[in-house]
Image (cartoon, rainbow, N blue to C red):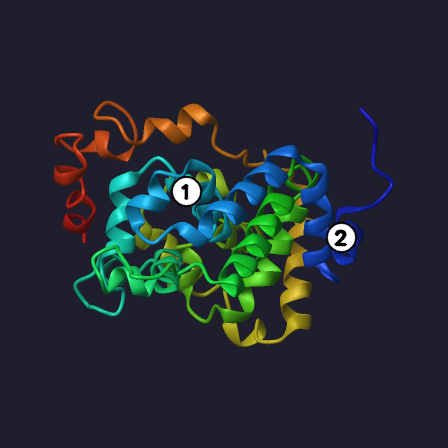
Amino acid sequence: MAISSISPVAAYISAEKDEETAAANYAKTDATTRNETAAFEKAAPSITSVDGLLKNYSALQVVLGAYNLSSISGETALIKDLLTQDPTSSTSLAKKSGNATWLAFADAFTTWGQNNGTASTTPFTSDTISSIVTMFQERQFENSDSNQDNGVGNALYFTRKMSSVTTLSQVMSDPTLLKVVETVSGYDPDQFGALDYSQQVRLLQNKVDFTKLSTPQEIQQYAERYLAMLQINPQTPDKPASLMDLFGGDTSDEGILALFDTSSSSTSTGSIYSGLF
């Protein structure tokens, strides 16, 4: 195995200067990213409903990937609840959950949420398609083996997202942000993940000072600390879900719904997520 002569911090600084371009260049060389992007760009203008999106595998992967939600790709009922309920309503799953990532996703498709999952025109305008493609390519770039093995991908994601994050709950609802914060705070993510939510909050609330994460320079320095700490205490990098993982979530025997005694039909399972909050 070849050993890179570039340190993770140096690689991060280089990519962070223009990640959009770096990600676009990566997309040209990665067949999966290139093919799914092309399929999405072709299909998106004709998708006018949530059902239409769910039926188009490639388009769905791009949209979920753009919002860092690839982990719920197989959870059809959850996706439908998020996209067919008005995110501005206090009774919607996105709002009740307190999950900032879910809410951002639902907010992006408010037109569907306010019209029970349909619209007379597609929400995928040319600007929206361009924005989603950029975000998807950035996540693919960040999740590439070369950027996950050394933590650079997580550092880049943290830098991109943290400027709009002002509360601990927002960090807690995003696994990637949380992993960076856990590490910089001196905790092992695997061990920390075994704690219940309230214990995690209690440990982190005195560790994270958002007033010191309010400028691009402060955010970059925090990301660099994360990379430096990984050099001292390496972690096993997260790998994207396999096809088996992605398909497993929509059956009665596997996935998140297996935790509950419920039918696997979309009608009956769709309300399960709402019932959790």
Which disc, if any, is residue 193?
A: 1
- Say what secondary structure mark 1 lies in: helix
In which quadrant of the rendered image does the N terminus lie? top right
Other-residue count near label 1 (Cα within 10 Å), few / some / many at <14 / 14–19 / ≥20: some
Q: Looking at the picture, how far across and down is residue 32, in whole percent?
A: 60, 34
Q: Which residue is the site of mark 2?
A: 9
Judge whether residue 119 can be spotted in this image: yes
- Asked if residue 129 lies left or right of residue 196, the reply is right
Amino acid type shown at disc 1: Gly
251 lies above or below 273 = above
Which residue is pictured at 30% across the width and 49% down the height? 50
User: Residue 148: which quarter of the image?
Assistant: top right
258 relative to 110 in the view: left or right: left
Comparing 192 with 174, the one in front is 174
Image height check: is 247 above or below 166?
above
Q: Position of residue 103 (x, y in %)?
A: 34, 61
Q: Is residue 30 above or below residue 136?
A: above
Above or below, comparing residue 28 to residue 174 in the picture: above
What residue occupies the far right of the structure in this picture? 5
Q: Amino acid at mark 2?
A: Val
